[in-house]
Image (cartoon, helix red, strand yellow):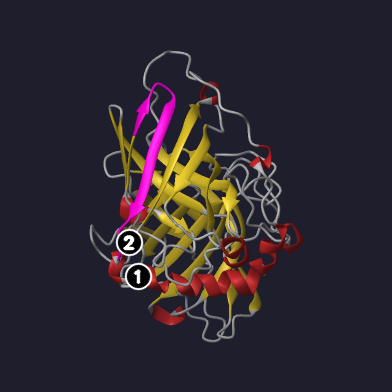
């Protein structure tokens, strides 16, 4: 699945979760975000902020941005060398109407003590879109490691060069929340729902599990997906030739992207011995089904989460199948939680609802 085909997932989200109501709630000034504090790591040394970060705009979004997309946000993986910051640009997701592609956003910055400045920039015509305007967002804030506990945050202000009041006031406040890598092998259990060709939820449900670990060198995800329960009800044939499926990467520069985690999101590709594969996108959620990114909303009805924030505790999943007896199956889930930590009963009424990716250009 290439980046452009993420529009398929957009359709799933819109069908399942009715996110269109989110815009009417708007943004609250500052959203109750904490004020900045200096030297939160207490050591006087340069903070280590490398890893998954989800930046969310808490004030300054324009009316068109809010109506069409909801809050602006950027999910990325920050790389740090000394005090210098860059990011994994191809695996950076952008929920902003100013961006026509929605991914592939480079960043540079620096960290001095706990003071962080990072700029995300896109050039005119980037990603093959002639109409893509140049823009940049510069975030300036203070890192708080929360004494080593979650959530670790960066809180501060931003400026941008969007130059369109309908999309942005040009400045405002933000909060970024850190999500850890999977440094040890971790298994999640949950239930998948399927959709028919008309986008309607079918009555079938399918228990599944996902095992993840982050490669410390290239930060790709490794592991496996067990979806042995996925059987085509019309033919009785299993969707895949063998189980578990192996998580794989298409390789650098491939348009499909990698199995990777950025901010609150992960993407994984897992295949059987014949090359048939499932594509899954997961979004970290709080216990009430709201986002696990502080001061963000994307559930329905729109609401913020109630914690825990910045953890890998619970994920909601969207999926597509490519090849084999279940080619083009797609659907969502009841939450996936870490095995051994009491996963949810999966009742529909308690289901967290998927993140908006409604730009149509992913």
Residue closest to the eye, 309 or 132: 132
| Of 200 and 171, the residue lying toward us | 171
> What number is the disc on residue 262?
none
Which residue in the protein does label 2 denote? 257
Q: Is residue 50 left or right of residue 230?
A: left
Element under label 1? loop
In terms of secondary structure, what is the magenta stretch mainly? strand
In the picture, residue 184 is in which quadrant?
A: top left
x and y percent of residue 89 in the render? 32, 52
Q: Residue 2, labelled with which disc?
A: 1
Whether pointer 2 and pointer 1 mark residues with C-beta atoms closer than 8 Å, the reply is: yes
Q: Is residue 241 visible?
A: no
Residues at marks 2 and 1, CA–CA distance in whole angstroms: 7 Å
Residue at image point 38% right, 72% down:
4
Quadrant where the image shows the N terminus = bottom left
Res 340 seen here: yes
Q: Which residues are magenta?
A: 110-124
Q: State the residue at coordinates (62%, 40%).
A: 341
Question: Furthest-top residue in view?
Answer: 43
């Amino acid at each position: 699945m290439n980046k452009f085909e993420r529009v398929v997932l957009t359709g799933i989200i819109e069908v399942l979760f009715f996110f269109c109501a989110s815009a009417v709630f708007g943004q609250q000034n500052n959203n109750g975000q904490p004020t900045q504090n200096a030297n939160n790591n207490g050591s006087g040394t340069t903070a280590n902020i490398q890893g998954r970060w989800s930046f969310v705009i808490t004030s300054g979004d324009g009316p068109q941005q809010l109506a069409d997309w909801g809050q602006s946000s950027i999910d990325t993986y920050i790389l740090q060398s000394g005090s210098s910051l860059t990011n994994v640009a191809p695996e950076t997701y952008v929920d902003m109407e100013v961006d026509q592609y929605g991914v592939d956003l480079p960043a540079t910055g620096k960290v001095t003590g706990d003071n962080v400045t990072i700029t995300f920039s896109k050039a005119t015509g980037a990603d093959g879109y002639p109409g893509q305007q140049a823009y940049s967002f510069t975030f300036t804030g203070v890192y708080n490691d929360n004494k080593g506990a979650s959530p670790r945050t960066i809180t501060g202000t931003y400026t941008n060069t969007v130059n369109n009041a309908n999309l942005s006031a040009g400045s405002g406040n933000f909060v970024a929340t850190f999500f850890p890598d999977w440094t040890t092998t971790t298994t999640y259990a949950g239930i998948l729902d399927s959709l028919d060709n008309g986008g309607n939820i079918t009555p079938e449900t399918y228990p599944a599990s996902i095992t993840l670990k982050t490669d410390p060198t290239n930060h790709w995800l490794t592991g496996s997906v067990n979806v042995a329960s996925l059987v085509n009800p019309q033919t009785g044939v299993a969707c895949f030739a063998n189980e578990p499926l192996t998580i794989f990467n298409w390789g650098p520069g491939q348009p499909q992207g990698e199995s990777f985690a950025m901010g609150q999101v992960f993407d994984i590709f897992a295949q059987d011995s014949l090359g048939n594969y499932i594509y899954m996108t997961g979004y970290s959620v709080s216990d009430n089904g709201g986002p696990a990114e502080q001061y963000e909303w994307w559930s329905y009805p729109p609401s913020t989460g109630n914690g825990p924030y910045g953890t890998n505790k619970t994920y909601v999943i969207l999926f597509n199948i490519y090849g084999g007896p279940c080619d083009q199956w797609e659907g969502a889930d009841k939450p996936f939680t870490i095995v051994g930590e009491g996963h949810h009963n999966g009742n529909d009424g308690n289901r967290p609802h998927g993140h908006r990716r409604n730009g149509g250009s992913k």
